[in-house]
Image (cartoon, helix red, strand yellow):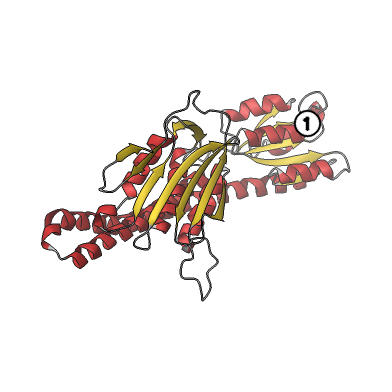
Amino acid sequence: MSPKPKILIVDDEEGPRESLKIILKPEFEVVTLGRGSEAVEILRDGGFELILLDITMPEDLSGIETLQAIRNADIDVEAIVISGQGATDPIMACVNLGAHRYIKKPYRADEVLTAVRSAIAHRTGRRRAHAMRERLLGSLSHELRTPLNAIVGYSEILHDEAREKLADEHRHALARIQHSSERLLAYWESLFFLGELDSGSVAVKPRELEVRSWLERLVRRIDRTSEGGPSVTLDCPAGILAETHPETLARLVAVLIYEATEDDGGVIAVSARSRAGALRLTVEHDRLPFDDPDENSQAAVTELAREVIARASELLGAVVTKRAASSDRVAIEISIPQRPVTTPSPEPRFTSTFATGALAASPR
């Protein structure tokens, strides 16, 4: 026999609390409280599927404040608000905070039961859809990653074993196959990762990172200069510290660099600075990503890349802008607001050129 859904009733008046408990107890497991602050604490332990919350509780947190605290704590629970007043503003505030519906006092037993059953069914359907999406994402992830990883792996074997036996044009074609496969794999990895973040499977917890060493590792993985691709330079002072979510930021920067490497030749300049309370990362190239696609534009950013850029930016709270760097080059800048976390002493500025696939640094 399935356990009864667990419901929390919060009202500062004992009479309405007990009335609701009598209505709901035959069908649900019911807990009652008189203070909103206590409700937030008990909900943290989980197990509740629904909270019925009185809007007016003058001695403690109001219904709006309680629901806001529940949402701020990222507690997964459906909510129904109960109002004994005619004012619509508090009710709309609770609806904007995700309340499933509201009930006006005096309420009828059948009205309460209908609202509660609807909220429980909504939560069950939402969780079922979430689980289905997770299974679908997992299946798609496997089906797409497996062949792409095979292409990347076999092209690496060919590159290592037969590179010297191939003509220049064949080596270049092999490099393009490998790079394009890695580029597509990076995009799909980014989408799946962002999907996990959106679903709550992975927590977006900012942490401190040393920007230069992080960028060196990122760019080294992407660089294909030794196979005839564009050269990549990195200009970043040592010692810059930033607070962000490195995995999401890596996917955003990687997509911008991969977009710039779609065309052969040219120099991709990656730079980072800490300015005006923000971390500013820039990818500069003579290609023009972010142009609106039209019949005269052959350099529009791909739709897949555009989706990754938009969603990663939103998760990071970043602003991505395009500006002219010169008459024939553009720069895509990522600006992420920061608390002041830069190094106390200035360090020499370096330019790193990935000319052979290995990191070579020289002072400017």
Q: Is residue 113 visible?
A: no
Whole-percent x, y for residue 250 in the image: 43, 44
Q: Judge by depth and name the residue closer to the eye, 26 or 49.
A: 49
User: Which residue: 79% across, 36% down?
Assistant: 55
Instruction: In the rendered view, tell whether residue 165 sits above or below residue 47.
Output: below
Q: Is residue 303 rendered to the left or right of residue 21? A: left
Q: In the image, what residue occupies the spot 34% across and 56% down?
A: 230
Q: Which one is nearer the viewer's eye here, 275 or 37? A: 275
**Residue 278 position by quadrant:** top right
Counting from the top left corner in percent of width and height, residue 205 is at 51, 34
Dot 1 amino acid type:
Ser
Q: Residue at x 43, y 47 (%)?
A: 270
To which quarter of the image does residue 315 belong? top right
Q: Is residue 298 visible?
A: yes
**Above-or-below relation of 118 to 162:** above
Q: Which residue is mark 1?
A: 62
Instruction: Name the one closer to the observer, 256 or 105.
Output: 256
